[in-house]
Image (cartoon, helix red, strand yellow):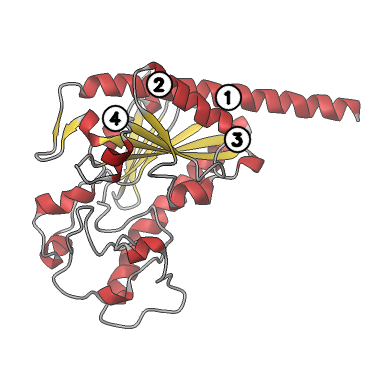
Amino acid sequence: MDGELSRFLFAADILDLQQPVARSLPLVLASPHSGTEYPADFLAASRLDPVALRRSEDSFVDELFGAAPRLGAPLLSARFPRAYVDVNREAYELDPSMFADALPKFVNAGSPRVRMGLGTIARIVASGEEIYAKKLCFAEAQRRIERLYRPYHQALRGLVEKTEAQFGGCLLVDCHSMPSGADSACEKSGADIVLGDCHGVSCAPQFVEAARCFLVERGFAVAINVPYAGGFTTGHYGRPRVQRHALQIELNRALYMNERDYERKACFPRLVHDLAELIDRLGRVVRECLLDQLEDRHRSRATD
């Protein structure tokens, strides 16, 4: 395509996948919560206005990490909003109090995320306000999960597996943002950026440290696993022992946007530039590590 990105929509226009012309970095980037296309039936069923519903969005995160395809790594984004269905959950983390009918036994109704009101089908927006004017039926939740949740993870899994096949491993970077309000966990931590590796379980420590060092060099206040250690995606995909790594990145929204009117700040392009350099740095570190491990295996076989 002569230097241009291959950008296309698929799975009934619910996902946006930006592919590089050539994969040169063993990374996959995902933005599960930046979707802004709110279905009409969802808006009609909600007791909140559209502005209030946006409080759960990771607004503009797909744009902030948008350099990934140009640098040689795919970027997958959900077009549907988190308040409608949250793909950073198990498939069926559901709150029984939200439904008029009984839920099947396979539903995880007792997870901490469900108790907080933030299951696969959320009961509240991030500010704590109830979303729905009346109870839902389970069939509606099932429809959203089958139509939106499963295609998202099918696409993400395919990207990870293709990257592993080419490079011998993969780092999945799950991209998020966090509100900066006075009572928020972000404000209490004092962090500009939080890196989450499920407390050392989902990602090799050298990759986390590479991200931390780069960001600190750029003047950001960085926290590790506090207050966000990683969600379902990080824990589900991260398997360092088989060279499948997953790292969650949370950006303080105050860095780049006005959270009241959802406007980008003047410094937005600067953060885009910094994150592009972070993607490049991480990709090079991961690629070098995978090459070293491959050479070690070859030397080991040669001496057997």
> Which residue is under mark 2?
216
Name the spot of residue 153 as percent of width and height, x first: 44, 52
Q: Which residue is mark 1?
A: 287
Residue at position x 37%, y 54% from top? 87
Tell me the CA gap for discs 4 and 1: 23 Å
Q: Secondary structure at mark 2?
A: helix
Classify residue 251 as left or right of residue 55.
Answer: right
Residue ID at (34%, 62%): 119
Pointer 4 or 3: first along the chain: 4
First in sequence: mark 1 vs mark 3: 3
Rounded to the nearest angstrom, the CA distance separating label 2 from label 3 is 26 Å
The answer to the question of whether label 4 and label 1 lie on touching residues, with beta carbons closer than 8 A, is no
Query: Compared to 232, does 123 lie above or below?
Result: below
Query: Which of 174 and 200 lies nearest the eye of the viewer?
Result: 200
Tell me which amino acid carries mark 2.
Val
Q: Is residue 71 visible?
A: no
- x and y percentages locating residue 3 in the rendered image: 37, 18
Residue linked to disc 3 = 169
Decide if residue 121 is on the left or right side of residue 54: right
Residue at image x 40%, y 34%? 223
**Which residue sits furthest top?**
217
Q: Quick one: SS at disc 3?
A: loop
Query: What whole-number distance in Å separates the C-alpha atoms at marks 4 and 3?
Result: 25 Å
Judging depth in this view, the residue of 25 and 46 nearest the camera is 46
Alpha carbons under labels 1 and 3: distance apart = 9 Å
Nearer to us of marks 1 and 2 is: 2
x and y percentages locating residue 39 in the rendered image? 18, 57
